[in-house]
Image (cartoon, rainbow, N blue to C red):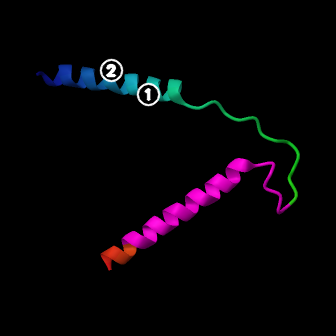
Amino acid sequence: MKAKTFISLMLILMLFIGGLFVVAAPAQKEVQKNACPAGTGAAHPDTQLQAGDGMIWQSVSRHLLSVVQ
């Protein structure tokens, strides 16, 4: 395969993958305009999911660090 052909194919592949990222990008959520009082989690149910996800990653990282040591 010639270098020119390889570069052309790689550019086409990069454009194709970029197009897939644009098409597959999730639509942005509408931002809630009124502020929630502190301590109420009912207005943002995904906040609790994000907090739980952070705790999972923290647990995994601690486990991996203990294995390495």
Residue at the spot 78% in from the left edge and 55% down from the top edge: 41
Magenta span of residues: 38-64
- Does the magenta run of residues contain 56? yes
Q: Amino acid at mark 2?
A: Ile
* Magenta stretch, overall SS: helix
Rendering coords of residue 54 (x, y %): 57, 61
**Quadrant (top left, top right, bottom left, bottom right) of the N terminus:** top left
Q: Which residue is mark 2?
A: 12
Q: Nearer the viewer, residue 34 or 8?
A: 34
- Residue 67 lies left or right of residue 45; in this view the side is left
Q: Which residue is mark 1?
A: 18
- Residue 62 lies left or right of residue 35; in this view the side is left
Q: Amino acid at mark 1?
A: Gly
Rendering coords of residue 6 (x, y %): 20, 24
Query: Is residue 38 placed above or below 15 in the rendered structure?
Result: below
**Residue 14 lies in quadrant:** top left
